[in-house]
Each structure stands twice: as structure tokens, then as C-alpha cells.
């Protein structure tokens, strides 16, 4: 059993739905018509490209190619995190890519070998979609975590300096901010985990059920992936904020404003 | 440390600090001996707070040299000084949350571990006319004067002997002003640098440094 193809007519009906937000935006002057159309267009092109590409990748199922593809995901994710922050690319992109790769790919390998028990750890059908889910969630959490940390440290500069003048080491003085950023970035993932199944059926589970898997298999996978996502997110955000704590301050312990874009 | 009371603790030679193209401090010299009590005066914007930031390594001079106990200022020394000096900043923005938790956090730092003395805390609270229930209030909800007194108490609890005090009596009433100045000036072993507009600090035994006058004859910065 496999899912029914959506016909071209079906797709047209689907895109027609976009008229609703467009009309609302027009009526309330939300100025979102452009973004809505652009967003839908980009999504379509990107997914079409990925659809063809993945067909090719899945047929070939070459471990090296799969690894390269996941590394590209890691790089794009790290770049997106920096793009959504006030930080300059040059000084942080390499450590960030490393942090993303170590935590997410590490989690992926653990997951494929011990949880699913695959013979081929890099099998495209598992390796690539699961990588997407884990990295995608890390990406979201990192945007929150890194922005939160940068905001806090700039807003509370004098409080941070007074901790230093009260004898704190850099790590001791920054710990309250690390704590807050971690909490803020992890909370959505945690809330997701706690409400899954009741409030929403996650995409992967829905996909598996439509694709013909039994709901029980789908649930097994969902439980496993949610734990993997949560753990990878915690490790990844933690590592990224630690990198920022290490790189973002000069030898005197003051925040390097030259790390900020436009400085 | 009887003999040490005359040794030089801090020495500043031709220090300049610039912010953009405006110069905040321009090439002045200064020497402070161990055990000395110094009042730093001068109009707003003359660089009094900047002077303290220099001593703590929060600002690096564009030229000139600072010495602390004869050692030339660098990053390693700055970290060392921060552990040796008690600094109270002007804005009293030292933390947030329940005062008791703030104290716990501060005394969890490696440099302060084991320095917390509940008896001393109690007696300092009483001496500065604070009720003990102030410890259960949120720091951000305290009045300016209460914040200043909490900051003073913290600095005294960390058991340092060098104090950099930036306007710590501005929000206190006359009686408390006198008490606080007594506390800091009274201990011969302590080195105290105070920035203040309060005349209470101008006493016998307190050397007055007027940053404005000091910089008049000073060298030029480039």
C-alpha cells in the first residue's frame, strides 16, 4: 500500500487556498501579499528541486553522497543561524558548523545504529530525512538561543561587569545568561514533546501513516525521533552558546562588540 | 602590614582614554599608597568612573601605563585585581531576583567561596538600618538607597581590603552617609578610592584628587 499521488488538478485546488490569506492581507493591509506569494513560490521550487534530487540520491544510495548531502544541510543550518543573529559570519561559521556536525551527526549515527539498528548507517532512506528533522529543530533552537544570549549580554553589560568585579570568572559571571538562553531555546521543543499526539500529529508520523505504515510503527518512530531531537537540540545549543562565550569575549572578559555586524 | 602602609599600590603614568575622537582622560599621573583614603572629585563627564574602569581592566587606555603593586597592567593582572578589589558601581545594577539568591550566587564564585558570614551579614544589616526581610525581597524592587546599602554590604562581606566606591552614598540620608564613610575611612588597613559629590567624604585623613585640576597641567594625548 502506498499513498495516492496528488493530481495536477489537486495541486491547483491546493494553491487556490492561498487566495484566502492574500484577500485577508489585502483587506487588512497586512502588507504580506508579496511575502506570501514569494514564500509559496520559493517553497515550491526548493521542494521540487529536492524531490528530483532525492529521487536521484535514493536510487544511487551512495554513502559518500549521503554524507555530503547531510554536511550541506549542516552548513546551510549554521549559516542560517548566523544570518538570523547580529553576529558576523567570519569569526563564527567554522566553529558553528563543527558544533552542528558533531552534535547532530553524532546523534544520527547513534540513532541509526542503536535505536533503529540499521546495517548501513548511511542508508539514504533513513539518514537524510532523519538528519533533516534533527538539524531543522536544532536550527530553530539555536536561533533563539544565540539571539537570546547576545541580547542579554548587551542589555546587562553593567551587571555582567559588576559580577566580574565581584570576583567572578568569566564562566561564573556568564552562567546566569547561559542558563536563561538554554531554557528559552529548549522550551518549545519540550512543549512539543509533552503535547505530541494530543494537540498535533507530527509530520513524520502523518507521513508514515499516509505512506502505508501501521500507526504503531509510526508511533515507535515518532517517540524515538522526538527524544533524538530533544537531546540533539540541548547539546547543540549548549555547545553553540559555549562557543560564543569563548569567542565573543576578549582576554579582559569584555564582550567583543566587533563581533556584531555593522560594528 | 605596618611597614606596607607606605608602599605604593597603584600608579598611573600618562594615561589617555579616548572614545571616538573625544578624549575622556588625557595623560595624567597618579599614585596611591596602600592604606590611603582617596576622594576622587570633579564635574560629571570628567572621567571619574572611567578611572575605575581602567583599574578593573574594563577599559584599556589608548596610551600610558597602569601599575598595580608594581606589576604592569595586562589581562592576567586585571583578572587578579578583580578578585582582590571590592568595586561598587554607580548604577547599582548588580543583579536581579531575590536578594538572598543574589548573595548565594556571588558567594558561589570560586574567589568568594567560604567568605560568607551570616553573623556579619546580620550585624551589617542592623548597622545600616535594614530589616532582615529585605533579603527576601527582589533586588530590582528596592529603593535606590536600599540597593546602595545592599551593594555596600556585599562588598564588605567579600572580605577585600581595597575598595573602589562609585557614588555609594548619594541616595542615603545624612546619618547613614556619616556611618558609611566612617566604616570605610575608619579601617587603617584598607585602601579606599571613593568617587562622590558628598561633602561627608571630605575629612581629615582623606586625600582629595580633583580630576579636573589634575588634567589641566597634564600632557597631551595623540
Image (cartoon, coloured by chain):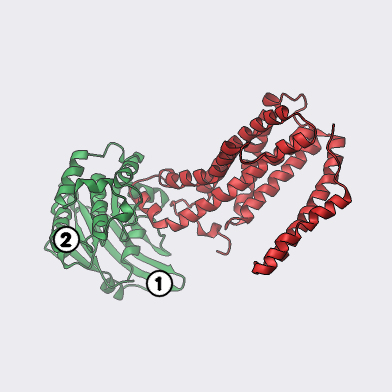
Chain colours: A red, B green
Chain for numbered disc 2: B
Provide the residue designation for mark 1.
B23
Front in this rendered view, residue A103 or B112: A103
Q: Nearer the viewer, mark 2 or mark 1?
A: 2
- Tag 1 secondary structure: strand
Horizontal and vertical percent position of residue B49: 32, 63
Q: Are marks 2 and 1 in contact (CB under 8 Å)?
A: no
Horizontal and vertical percent position of residue B129: 16, 52
Q: Quadrant of the N terminus of chain A?
A: top right
Q: Residue at x 85, y 40 (%)?
A: A4
User: In the figure, A216 relative to B9: above or below?
Assistant: above
Q: Quadrant of residue A188?
A: top right
Q: Is residue B159 visible?
A: no
Mark linked to residue A137? none
Q: Using the numbered discs, state the Cα–Cα distance from disc 2 to disc 1 in whole angstroms.
A: 33 Å
Q: Residue at x 42, y 51 (%)?
A: B75
Horizontal and vertical percent position of residue A87: 58, 56
Q: Is residue B125 left or right of residue B58?
A: left
Q: Is residue B189 left or right of residue B93?
A: left
Same subunit, tags 2 and 1 = yes
Front in this rendered view, residue A206 or B37: A206
Q: Residue at x 67, y 68 (%)?
A: A27
Q: Quadrant of the C terminus of chain A?
A: bottom right
Provide the residue designation for mark 2.
B177
Amino acid at each position: 500500500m502506498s499513498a495516492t499521488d496528488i493530481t495536477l488538478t489537486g495541486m491547483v485546488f491546493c494553491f487556490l487556498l492561498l487566495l484566502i490569506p492574500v484577500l485577508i492581507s489585502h483587506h487588512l493591509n497586512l502588507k504580506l501579499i508579496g511575502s506570501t506569494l514569494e514564500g509559496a513560490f520559493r517553497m515550491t521550487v526548493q521542494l521540487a528541486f529536492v524531490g528530483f534530487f532525492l529521487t536521484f540520491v535514493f536510487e544511487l544510495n551512495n554513502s559518500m553522497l549521503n554524507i555530503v548531502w547531510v554536511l550541506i544541510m549542516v552548513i546551510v543550518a549554521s549559516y542560517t543561524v548566523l544570518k538570523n543573529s547580529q553576529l558576523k559570519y567570519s569569526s563564527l561559521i567554522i566553529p558553528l558548523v563543527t558544533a552542528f556536525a558533531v552534535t547532530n551527526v553524532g546523534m544520527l549515527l547513534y540513532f541509526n545504529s542503536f535505536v533503529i539498528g540499521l546495517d548501513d548507517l548511511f542508508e539514504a532512506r533513513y539518514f537524510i530525512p532523519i538528519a533533516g528533522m534533527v538539524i531543522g529543530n536544532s536550527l530553530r533552537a539555536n536561533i533563539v538561543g544565540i539571539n537570546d544570549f547576545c541580547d542579554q549580554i548587551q542589555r546587562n553589560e553593567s551587571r555582567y561587569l559588576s559580577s566580574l568585579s565581584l570576583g567572578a570568572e568569566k564562566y561564573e559571571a556568564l552562567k546566569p545568561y547561559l542558563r536563561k538562553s538554554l531554557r528559552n531555546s529548549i522550551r518549545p521543543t519540550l512543549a512539543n514533546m509533552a503535547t505530541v499526539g494530543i494537540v498535533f500529529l507530527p509530520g513524520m508520523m502523518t507521513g508514515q501513516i499516509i505512506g502505508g505504515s501501521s500507526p504503531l510503527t509510526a508511533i515507535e518512530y515518532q517517540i524515538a525521533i522526538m527524544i533524538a531531537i530533544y537531546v540533539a537540540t540541548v547539546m547543540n545549543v549548549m555547545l553553540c552558546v559555549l562557543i560564543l562565550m569563548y569567542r565573543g569575549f576578549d582576554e579582559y572578559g569584555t564582550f567583543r562588540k566587533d563581533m556584531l555586524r555593522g560594528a | 602590614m605596618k611597614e606596607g602602609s607606605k608602599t605604593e599600590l597603584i600608579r598611573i603614568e600618562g594615561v589617555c582614554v579616548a572614545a571616538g575622537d573625544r578624549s575622556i582622560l588625557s595623560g595624567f599621573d597618579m599614585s596611591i599608597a596602600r592604606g590611603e583614603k582617596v576622594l576622587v572629585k570633579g564635574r560629571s563627564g570628567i572621567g571619574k568612573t572611567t578611572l575605575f574602569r581602567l583599574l578593573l581592566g574594563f577599559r584599556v587606555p589608548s596610551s600610558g601605563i597602569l601599575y598595580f603593586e608594581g606589576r604592569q597592567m595586562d589581562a592576567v593582572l586585571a583578572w587578579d585585581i578583580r578578585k582582590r578589589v571590592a568595586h561598587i558601581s554607580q548604577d547599582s545594577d548588580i543583579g536581579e531576583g531575590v536578594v538572598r539568591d543574589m548573595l548565594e550566587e556571588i558567594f558561589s564564585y570560586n574567589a568568594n567561596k567560604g567568605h560568607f558570614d551570616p553573623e556579619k551579614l546580620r550585624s551589617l544589616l542592623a548597622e545600616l538600618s535594614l530589616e532582615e526581610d529585605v533579603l527576601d525581597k527582589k533586588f530590582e524592587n528596592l529603593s535606590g538607597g536600599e540597593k546602595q546599602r545592599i551593594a555596600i554590604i556585599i562588598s564588605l562581606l567579600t572580605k577585600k581590603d581595597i575598595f573602589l566606591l562609585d557614588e555609594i552614598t548619594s541616595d542615603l540620608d545624612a546619618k547613614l552617609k556619616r556611618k558609611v564613610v566612617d566604616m570605610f575611612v575608619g579601617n587603617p588597613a584598607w585602601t579606599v578610592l571613593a568617587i562622590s559629590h558628598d561633602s561627608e567624604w571630605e575629612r581629615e585623613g582623606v586625600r582629595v584628587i580633583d580630576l579636573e585640576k589634575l588634567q589641566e597641567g597634564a600632557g597631551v594625548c595623540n
